[in-house]
Amino acid sequence: SIAVSRAAASGDNFGRAFGSTGNPGCPSRIACKPARAARLNGASPDAAARDLATQLDIAALLHEPARELSVGQQQRVAAARALMGNPELVIADEPTSALDHDHRAQFLETLFQCCQRAGSTLLFVSHDRSLEPMFDRALSLPELQRRPA
């Protein structure tokens, strides 16, 4: 069995960014829980949200209803929400699946910079094997499943 602390289970220590199927009702506003707001290095949650939104090219969309955002825009909002408050772990499940080439490159650069600045560990899940060279370590689930226990 796996034991998880209440703080870990509440999302105070990790951020989640999901691809389009895991993120269907993503709100366009970026919120921050109090425990994560305390880790903003003196910045207000609003200022930190605006900064992330600018880096992810979604600043003009902060007040738009989620239903009016493209899937790629929703993914970038989800990423901004995941990165708020410098979480220890960022879990990104297919965060680039709906992004065009230019937004994908910008998103990945911002994601890596934010994780490095915060000292966050990044767990990135993707079917796009062309991204593997960008990471320190890449694992293939089918290969892991074939390994003897």
Image: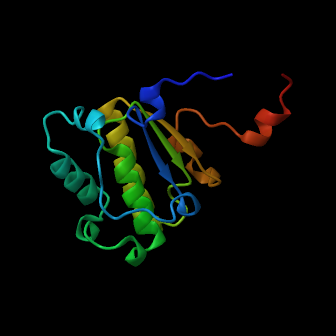
Considering depth in this image, is 147 or 32 the residue closer to the camera? 32
Considering depth in this image, is 53 or 36 the residue closer to the camera? 36
Q: By what rule are the colours in the image chosen? A: rainbow
Rendered view: 122 above or below 149: below
Which residue lies at the image location 51% right of the left edge and 65% below the top edge?
A: 24
> In what quadrant of the picture does the N terminus appear?
top right
Which quarter of the figure has residue 104?
Answer: bottom left
**Residue 51 spot, x, y in % from top left:** 21, 52
Which residue lies at the image location 32% right of the left edge and 58% below the top edge?
A: 56
Question: With 92 as the anchor, is 120 left or right in this view?
Answer: left
Question: With 13 as the anchor, is 125 left or right in this view?
Answer: right
> In what quadrant of the picture does the C terminus appear?
top right
Which residue lies at the image location 58% right of the left edge and 21% below the top edge?
A: 3
Q: Residue furthest bottom?
A: 68
Considering depth in this image, is 113 or 27 the residue closer to the camera? 27
Which residue lies at the image location 43% right of the left edge and 35% below the top edge?
A: 10
Rendered view: 42 above or below 54: above
Rendered view: 105 above or below 137: below
Which quarter of the figure has residue 117?
Answer: top left
**Residue 121 spot, x, y in % from top left:** 45, 31
Rendered view: 20 above or below 91: below
**Count of numbered badges drawn on the protein:** 0
**Residue 97 spot, x, y in % from top left:** 55, 62
